[in-house]
Image: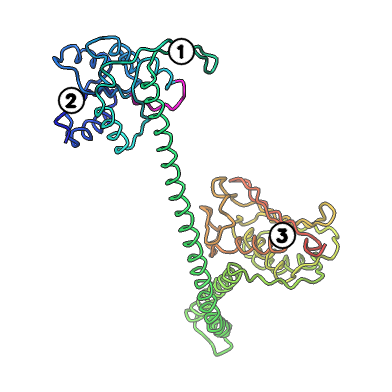
Amino acid sequence: MTDRLHILVAEDSAVQAAVLCRLLSENGYRVTLARDGQAAWELLERTPEPPALLISDIEMPLMDGYSLCRKLKADSRFRGVPVILLTNLGDPLHVVSGLQAGADNYITKPFDHKLLLARVASLLANPGLYSQPERAEPLSFKLDDQDFTICSGRAQILNLLLSTFEGAVWQNEQLRRTNEELSSAHREIAAKNEQLKELMALQNQFLGMVTHDMRNPLGIIQGYSRILANGLAGELTEKQAKFSEAIHRSARSLIALVNDLLEISEIESGNLRLDRQPTDLVALVEQAVELNGFLAEDKNIRISSSLSPVPLALLDPNKIEQVINNLLSNAIKFSHPNSQVSLDLRASREGWVELVVRDQGQGIPKEEQANIFQHYQRTSVKSTAGEKSTGLGLAIVKRIVEGHGGSISLDSEPGRGSVFTVRLPLIPPEIK
């Protein structure tokens, strides 16, 4: 115990003051609090017996910690009271200013509770050291182009510098512990990422198995519903034909979803297999235009194409056909009836070819464009005839294009339509 030694605390921060008072009181000290330097000095003058120790913040209104310390050390009544200065600042100039003011110790905030209590105990254990201050010749020096003169004794200088060094050591220890915690957190995150990769791989494997098993029965449903709708299994009533057509459309949508899920699970598993071979892109585009023409006719949308001769490209024709079909069907899906969709194919700079799909549709808001190529992402833009979307098509397109060493970009503005530009190398980079 400390026999209730009296400590005066000068601190303008209510939070810091509460922490200091509670810490010191819980450790057996009697504490008086002043909210600034001026209030602390007035308390000193009214107190019959000087406190055993003064702990003062530096930056305070009315009278700062340096001024309070100088005034205390200049008064014979309080000269023997040791002073600890608290500051948020770690500049060497502030240490020198503390020496000039006659401070005995220096702690940088935020402080460690054990460190502060150890400093308090050390100063209070040697009361005679401060009651008879050592006289010293003035010491002048220059620091950061400023001239300083201090008259502190050697013991006081040593004590203050040692406290500053101890504070630096403590801060370094805190940094070391923080770095160790960060390293541990990084290792834990890396381990969690590995677990996540394993779970994602299992998810993709499961998804692939389920969707693969679903495709065959869905194909049978689609085929038989078409046979029924066409009356090939017997004459149907108007209502029965309508139901059969609805079954056929639903089965077709489900098969499209299953195919997209299979494709994305394969890609996400890192199993995008490309069967590259010399490919006539002009023929692929013409085939896609013809295939999607039926969809366009339903909405009276005209597909125009401008196909410049381009050399044979070393690509996977089935995958690239999937890219073209997806971009064209998307353009039709989100375009208004009686509008136009255009498709341009041209050689760009040497060794590259560009495929541009342009529509006169609704356009995509700028804030939604960043995620347009992420899977399961849908925009606020709705199809113009109620067509369904899986939110996977553009994600698949992007991965196929990038798997070929190419790129895809979007230029869109609400009310002005969208332009998708695909750039593909004629020869894959790894073969050049």
For label 3, the residue is 303
Q: Secondary structure at mark 3?
A: strand
Question: Mark 2: few, some, or many residues within 10 Å (few <14, many ≥20)?
Answer: some
- Image point (85%, 54%), residue name: 350
Q: Position of residue 219 (x, y in %)?
A: 57, 82
Give the number of the mark in front: 1 or 2: 1
The image shows residue 295 at horizontal and vertical percentages of 64, 66
Image quadrant assignment for residue 102 = top left
Type of amino acid at the residue the image marks with label 1 = Leu
Q: CA distance from mark 1 to mark 2?
A: 33 Å
> For the point 29% across and 35% down, which residue is it?
118
Q: Which of disc 2 and disc 1 is earlier in sequence?
A: 2
Where does the magenta region start and end?
85-93
Residue 263 drawn at (x, y percent): 60, 71
According to the picture, the residue beneath numbered tag 2 turns out to be 6
Q: Tell me residue 251's x, y (percent).
A: 53, 77
Q: Residue furthest bottom?
A: 234
Q: Secondary structure at mark 1?
A: strand
Label 1 environment density (alpha carbons within 10 Å; few <14, some 14–19, many ≥20): few
Q: Is residue 89 magenta?
A: yes
Residue 269 in the magenta stretch? The answer is: no
Q: CA distance from mark 3 to mark 2?
A: 91 Å
Q: Amino acid at mark 3?
A: Ile
- Residue type at mark 2 is His
Residue under pointer 1: 139
Residue drawn where x is 53% and y is 70% of the image: 201
